[in-house]
Amino acid sequence: MKERLERLKVVKSLIKTHRIDSQDSLLQLLAEAGYSVTQATLSRDLKYLKVGKVADGHSGYYYTMPSEEERKESEKHSIQDFLRGYVSVDWNESIVVVRTFSGHSDSVALAIDNMGMEDVLGTISGRDNVVFVALRKGSRGDDFIAALKGKIPEFDPE
């Protein structure tokens, strides 16, 4: 986990200090910085960081980090989607089950993914009204609930 967090900081720094136009270029810069990752891992990192591409004004595009305002606005929408769709939350040591209103499981799962909580390994949206949240090794349901309350002060799992 620590290596991932350090790698994400390096990716952000590289994007802010270089004009990077491809994942291959970014992979090479990461390798020079001592990080050997696959293209799939880098793609997940870029998605997690909400990295975008902007036109360079000529014939290509380059990576850019979202502004703090854009990041906060995106998180605000995720929080609204979660609050609008969840009914109840229950958990044990390694899995959290979020019951949702009918038809809201996809948006609630995406909201949890987009909130970027470190305890979350991933989500699985049920067919209609349930989301399963797999937690990272060493994380517990109580940790997830605490992180969720940190992101959403008005959240009450009771």
Image: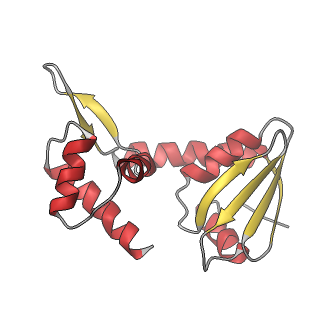
Front-lying residue, 36 or 54:
36
Quarter residue 9 falls in: bottom left
Q: Quadrant of residue 53?
A: top left
**Which residue occupies 26% across, 30% down?**
54
Q: Quadrant of the C terminus?
A: bottom right
Q: How many marks?
A: 0
Report whether residue 118 is seen: yes
Is residue 154 at all visible to an observer of this figure? no
Residue closest to the eye, 36 or 70: 36
On screen, residue 30 versus residue 5, left or right, reads left
> x, y (%) of residue 4?
39, 67
Where residue 44 sits: x, y (%)? 44, 50
**Residue 33 location, x and y as percent?**
18, 64
Residue at x 17%, y 54% (from the top left corner)? 29
Image position of 94 with respect to 124: above or below: below
Is 113 above or below relative to 120? above
Quadrant for the N terminus in the image: bottom left
Which quadrant of the structure image shows residue 154? bottom right
Which residue is located at x 15 percent, y 61 percent?
Answer: 32
Is 118 positioned to the left or the right of 18 in the image? Answer: right
Image coloring type: secondary structure
Identity of the residue furthest to the bottom in this view? 138
Residue at 35% across, 48% down: 39
Residue 120 % position (x, y): 60, 63
Using the image as rendered, state which of residue 27 and residue 112 is in the foreground: 27
Q: On the picture, is 99 further left or further right than 63?
A: right
